Image (cartoon, rainbow, N blue to C red):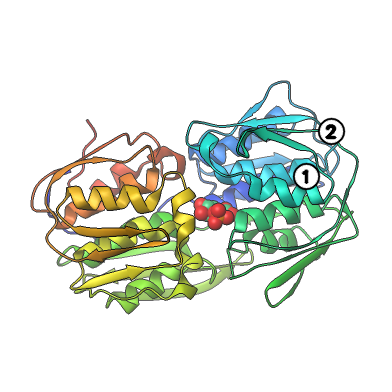
Amino acid sequence: MKPGGRLSGSLRVPGDKSISHRSVMLGSLADGITVVNGFLEGEDSLATLNAFRQMGVVIEGPTAGRVTIHGVGMQGLQAPAAPLDLGNSGTSMRLLSGLLAGQGVAVTLTGDSSLSGRPMKRVIDPLARMGAEIASAEGGTSPLTIAANAPLKGIDYRLPMASAQVKSAVLLAGLYAEGETCVTEPAPTRDHTERMLQGFGYRVRRNGDRVCLDGGGRLQACEIDVPADISSAAFFLVGACIAEASEIVLEHVGVNPTRDGIIAILRLMGADIERLRERVIGGEPVADIRVRSAPLHGIEIPRSLVPLAIDEFPALFIAAACAEGETRLSGAEELRVKESDRIQVMADGLGCLGIRAEPAPDGILIRGGTIGGGQIESHGDHRIAMSFAIAALRASASIEIIDCANVNTSFPGFVALAAEAGLGISEI
Ligand code: S3P
């Protein structure tokens, strides 16, 4: 990465990862043909797509973001001939655990070394209470083997942590459960599952922090337009804030209020961000986002915004490193169990570039300063790699990032798009 530069132009980042996963899951279980446009052709969502192909669903594409899913109905999945390899994708593993728990087919779910170290007890426990039988490796990690089990029964579950994946796993199992399944969340988390279920004609009831559905219904195929992923836009949002004389427009970005914490946090730090052409497409709020460079200052990040920006903290830590003064994050212990331990890995990387960063069990304190050059170990975490790539816009010397192949899990084409926007980036 060459140091310096500025970002300009209009960009459309790839489709939303969370929505892409869910489109294949619900489209596969629906009656009829679901057409998805804007599908993320990244390794994570392709892992979900391949899993459903292995369970007998006919899926055409993706071709230029278009996927056509021939739904098999709620009971139409077939037992796969081999374990389903979900690669690096926590969303695939956790949501599929719920979706498959009541199918009556035996399935084993596996993943790469990062996914095999991530906590799965958080989904196994509530699903077991519903009557599922899921065996895991010691310590509650994958591989997970789901038994071909009797029907499930609904539960009333209070999430122990703010996790959309656990909420979604329980709700998807609830589709197959007898009676009502309810989930209460400690803080709002992304609600794409609930929105998309409604888009497929399934009744979902929300009352404050509690969401409920009845088992035994059916899904009606529909058309899905996947907006650009705000979590991928995040790197350009931060990049345009920190690089002098930058101005970009990010097009057609999903700005669901359970996902837009990054905009609120950057604005609190002094960012110049405007939402243009706000609209609702297929039940999801979408906007173009204009960002101009602005001097940032450190803040105490409000705890209420943490779940709404949970995937954007690696990028936000780069903003904090470029800000005047200190930025403190707390209440974000979930960052330690993402694709890598994002608190430690970011603290190490920032330290290596000469920025003072003090990790804490549930957050970090970052003192803004001058970013130097150096070699960063991304630990195979896509968002760590892309965050340090953006840091180069304000670095005084070159930054080299190693172990970057996983950028393709969420953002295929990142290097080309970033270079087009003005980042001095090359692959070696
Ligand atoms: C996701 C939920 C979040 C997020 C992940 C995608 C989803 O995980 O970090 O990238 O699509 O439901 P948690 O539920 O573990 O917070």
Dot 1 alpha-carbon crowd within 10 angstroms: few under 14, some 14 to 19, many 20 or more: many
Which tag, 2 or 1, sits closer to the chain's start? 1
Q: Quadrant of residue 191?
A: bottom right
Q: Are marks 2 and 1 in contact (CB under 8 Å)?
A: no
Q: Quadrant of residue 291?
A: bottom left
Kindly give the residue lying farthest to the top in the view shown: 81
- Residue 16 in view (yes/no): no
- Taking the image in four quarters, ligand 1 sits in the one at bottom right
Question: Mark 1 highlights which residue?
Answer: 29
- Residue 57 in view (yes/no): yes
Dot 2 alpha-carbon crowd within 10 angstroms: few under 14, some 14 to 19, many 20 or more: some
Residue 339 placement (x, y as % from top left): 45, 44
Residue 236 placement (x, y as % from top left): 31, 58
Residue 289 placement (x, y as % from top left): 38, 69
Kindly give the residue lying farthest to the left in the view shown: 396
| Residue in the foreground of this view, choosing between 138 and 264 | 138
Query: Which residue is pictured at 76% across the width and 48% down the height?
Result: 127
Whether the residue under disc 1 has CB within 8 Å of ligand 1: no
Query: At numbered mark 1, what does the secondary structure look like: helix, strand or loop?
Result: helix
285 in relation to 388, above or below? below
Q: Taking 60 as reference, is 116 left or right?
A: left
226 in relation to 257, above or below? above
Disc 2 residue type (three-letter): Ala
Looking at the rendering, in which quadrant would you find the C terminus?
A: top left
| Residue in the foreground of this view, choosing between 104 and 4 | 104
Q: Taking 238 as reference, is 125 left or right?
A: right
Residue 186 placement (x, y as % from top left): 62, 69
* Count of numbered marks: 2
Query: At numbered mark 2, what does the secondary structure look like: helix, strand or loop?
Result: loop
Question: Mark 2 highlights which residue?
Answer: 148
User: What whole-number distance in Å separates the C-alpha atoms at marks 2 and 1?
Assistant: 17 Å
